[in-house]
Image (cartoon, helix red, strand yellow):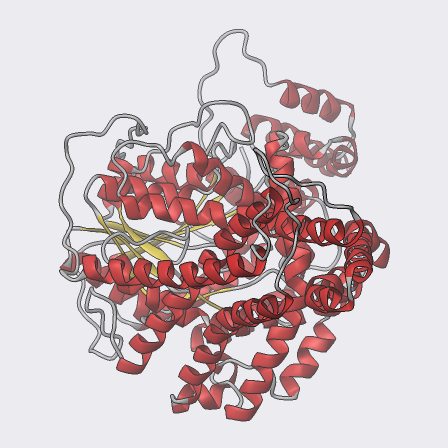
Amino acid sequence: MHDMTLPLPPERVTLPPEQPLTMPEQSLWRVAETARAPARPIRSGWRRLLVFGATAILTAIGLHEMYLVLQVQGLTLAEAVVLGLFGSLFAWIAFSLVSSVIGFVAILRGRDNSLGIDATAPLPDLAARTAILLPTYNEDPQRVMSRLQAIWESVRDTGRLDHFDVFVLSDTTDPDVWVREEAAYVGLVERTGATNIFYRHRRENIARKAGNIAEWTTRFGGAYAHMLVLDADSLMTGDTIVRLAAAMERHPGVGLIQTFPVILAGTTLFARIQQFAGRLYGPLIARGIAWWHGAESNYWGHNAIIRVEAFAGQAGLPLLRGRKPFGGHILSHDFVEAALMRRAGWAIHMAPSLGGSYEECPPSLTEYAVRDRRWCQGNLQHLGVLPARGLHWVSRLHLLTGIGSYVSSPLWLVFLLVGILLSLQAQFVKPEYFPAGFSLFPQWPAQDPVRAAWVFAGTMAVLIVPKLLGWIAAVVQPGERRGSGGAVRSFVSVVLETLITSLIAPIMMLLQSRAVAEILLGRDAGWQAQQRDAGRTDWRLLARLYGGHVVLGGLLGAAAYAVSAPLLLWMTPVVVGLVLAIPTVALTSSERVGVALRRAGLLLMPEERDPPPVLVRAQALAADRAESAPAGAASALQRLAADPALLAAHRAMLPERTPRRKGDVDVTLVVALARIAEADSVAEAATLLTARETFAVLADRDALDALMEKDRDDARAV
């Protein structure tokens, strides 16, 4: 039909032969009789007893001290509420402290994970095949393909490339991004000469990322022993990928190995704060939890290798009962997939010290909140998974921890509000509280201000000690110390990070509290593409998004001052964070401030002093692609019309349409064909079609051919 030729043979832009694998939907309420007992460290029992015992002791001490603060003349109902909320919040930070201390000791002792992965040993040989999966959804195609090329080249340089295939699994819904994605993929294959990089676009992105991975599993999973799941912003070294695959081969009872991704490539102050904190304090937490997780670890959705047999057999996610946002497809699928695989006996491990695993961070608090809102809904959905039968108690704890990470914000807010109201009542309202039964004297609300100050200081210490331990762990390691700017600069960075995160924390408290409230009221988060580049500061937008924070901060400050100056001083971190919400978000979104601090040697991380080659290569490729990108903003249809080779590649990559039943009509496509009939050229049709109609045309060979014939008719007429 067409006299155009591909720059690549047709088989290079098509998928490999399918090898289907069944992936049955799992029941949360029935347990299959195929459970197996995974190997785990013999000492995991006492390790867990130590962690939870230490957390319980710290929490009991904090509760006792807070009780002494509140019960000066008897404990009122309101004071009992404050005490309960304090206990819940204190247990949360005490658990983090215990994990950090254990991780600190593990780093000093040089202990590795229980799988025995040694990053310094010679690179092992491989026997099995592994698929590297890169799901993408409306992302910048050039950046995605640049990172993927850097990963592919890094694997190639290990000499083990024959054991890997790479799949780009697109769920993109924006037609312009879709065509740019295909162009970037064809360019990637041309540049590398790769015969093992494949691209698949899914027309209907059912169940989002979980459905994307599951669809690949049922079509191609039978050909592979393992799959390495990435995110669109992931980077991993070939060395790490090979060692993960080898570890799976050595341990046939392991279903999943999760790496600890390091955040990097941040340019704004917000991103640099996140990556500095993650790099300095994160390893302590990761080593600490890996120490007691054993074979019951967790999955974070990316930068992890999974045994295909375990995933296909046990990770078919069910639909949750009820309506959105609690019902329907599970958004935070990773926790549940790990729990289901562990329920069937597959070991789930973490390898926190392996290295060579990276990701990026949203550039601003606003973009972070968009992603966090989706995560919040997904984690709260786990309330429907918690009672599932047969789950390991540690898996339930992972689910509960995810829920608690968001519920803690409204608990903190209620704790503050009740505390303020209690203080106002004691200051201005005549007490008329009589206990049940006969009493000559009222139960006056009273607190011990001196002891309250000590409780506050102790709570701050529990929050700050993990940061100091992270700094000490970096200082005692020469490479880490130099990479963090030296002992003095890194300490200044810790202080700076602590101050800025103290300002951000109250803002996040309100954002997450609002998210929880919206979810409880039935509002769905939807699925938005992640914005990964810093933009210009829009003060009107910031005022609209964070004006309520400023108002609440002012009210809390006024209420605290009405009680006493010491109470206002105690509330200062929250009040200042809320009142300064708008300038804080603007400041932390600034690339100029982030770059200036980097030049001053602050908020540094070792990967900036000595960047991993895979990052350097990805950034160089992205810069080259940006320079060579065609000028202008041609629509998807116009771009295909102007590039016969790309059009042929697009047609070759379209799947065959499934036969439709009589009476089934694709209304969007029918409307699009009607508009095409009225247009005289592709350019005119591009202006008439909506985004959904353009997508429908791009997904249908016959409709696309009919449209492209418009320009060929004009060319023949000329």
Residue 146: x, y in percent? Answer: 51, 64
Residue sticking out furthest to the top: 663
Q: Residue at x 59, y 35 (%)?
A: 438
Task: Judge whether 488 appears above or below 319 on screen.
Answer: below
- Quarter of the image that includes the C terminus: top right
Residue 645 appears in the rendering? no
Residue sticking out furthest to the front: 440
Residue 515: x, y in percent? Answer: 63, 43
Q: Residue at x 21, y 39 (%)?
A: 344
Quadrant of residue 86 within the rendered picture:
bottom right
Residue 640: x, y in percent? Answer: 63, 44
Residue 479 appears in the rendering? yes
| Number of numbered tags placed on the structure image | 0
Horizontal arrangement in the rendering, residue 482 relative to residue 440 (left or right)? left
Task: Judge whether 444 appears above or below 156 on screen.
Answer: above
Q: Who is closer to the viewer here, 471 or 702?
A: 471
Q: Who is closer to the viewer here, 305 or 396?
A: 396
Q: Who is closer to the viewer here, 481 or 158?
A: 481
Q: Who is closer to the viewer here, 297 or 102?
A: 102
Horizontal arrangement in the rendering, residue 184 relative to residue 559 (left or right)? left
Task: Judge whether 147 appears above or below 371 on screen.
Answer: below
Residue 295: x, y in percent? Answer: 23, 54
Q: Residue at x 55, y 86 (%)?
A: 491
